[in-house]
Image (tube, grey):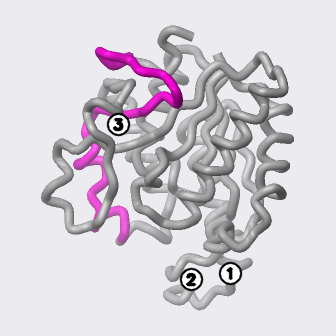
Amino acid sequence: MKFLYIFPHPDDESFGPALAMTHQLRAGHEVYLLTLTKGGATKKRFKYNLSIPEMGEVRHKEMLNVAKVLDLTGMTVFDLPDSGLKEMNPIKIEQVVEDHLNKIQPDILVTYAVHGISGFHDHLVTHAVVKRVYCDMLAKGNAFLKRLALFTLAESGMADTKFKLSTSTAQEIDCVTIVDESDIEKSRQALLCYETYQDVIAEVGVLERVGNKVYFEFFQEDYTPPATDISEGV
C-alpha cells in the first residue's frame, strides 16, 4: 500500500510519526512524505544569524538526510510560508495538496489530529486543509483514497510534561502501532539529522516519552479494540 504523510514543518515527521513510518516501510509499504514549508521562520534562525530563506535551506538539507536515514519511498518539500499558513487563502493550499495527492495516489493519508498536538496554528491549518481535501476528493469519486489517519498522542504518560501538548482519549484512538528497537533506532538517527534542533530535541525527550507505541485516530471510523496498523481493514 501507499501511505502519504503530510505535515507543515521539517522535523514534524521525526517527532513521533517516523517510528510508524519506518515500521511500515519494513512491512513492505510505500511511504511518502510531504512537508508544506521549509521551516525557515523558526526562532532558531537568530542563533545562527540566518534569514528565513537561509534557515529554510538549512532545514531542507537536514530533511534530505532524514529521507535517506528512513529510506522513504519519496519526499517532497514545498516552500509555503512557515508560520504563515493561517494568512494564506486555504483554497490555494488545498489545491497544491490535491495536486500532490493526484500525483502520488496514496491509499492512506496521514496528518495531525484536530488539536495538532502542540496547538501551533500551522499544525491546525494543515489538519483542516488535508481533511477538507480528503473529503472533497472522495466526493469527486477518487477511488484510490481509502483512509485518513490522524497522528496523535495518548493521555497516558503525558501528565508530567512541562510542554502543553494535546492528546486523544482512549475512546478516540483507533490504532496503536507497536514498533521494535530497529524502528526506534532509525527514529533516533532521523532526529540526529536535525543538527540545528538538537537542544530542543534533548529538552523534549521525544523518543523517551513516545516509547514503542504510535497512536492514530481514523477519520469517521471506530475501531474497538484498536487496530495495530493503519492499513488494517483497508
Indicate whether 17 appears above or below 109: below
Indicate whether 24 appears above or below 40: above
Q: Tell me the CA gap for discs 3 and 2.
A: 29 Å
* 133 and 190: which is toward the camera: 133
Asked whether the residues under the numbered discs 1 and 2 touch, taking CB atoms below 8 Å apart as contact, a structural biologist would say yes
Residue reaching furthest left?
160
Q: In this figure, which residue is indicated by the disc labeled 1?
A: 52
Q: Is residue 143 left or right of residue 119?
A: right
Circle 2 SS class: helix
Q: In this figure, which residue is indicated by the disc labeled 3?
A: 184
Query: Which is more N-terminal, label 2 or label 1?
Result: 2
Query: Which is more N-terminal, label 2 or label 3?
Result: 2
List x then y, in percent, for residue 143. 78, 16
Q: Nearer the viewer, mark 3 or mark 1?
A: 1
Circle 1 SS class: helix
Whether residue 22 appears in magenta in the rendering, the answer is: no
Residue at the spot 13% in from the left edge and 59% down from the top edge = 160
Whether residue 204 appears in magenta in the rendering, the answer is: yes
Report the span colored magenta. 200-228
* 153 and 11: which is toward the camera: 153
Q: Quadrant of the N terminus?
A: top right
List x then y, in percent, for residue 23. 45, 25
The tag on residue 223 is none
Q: In this figure, which residue is indicated by the disc labeled 2?
A: 45
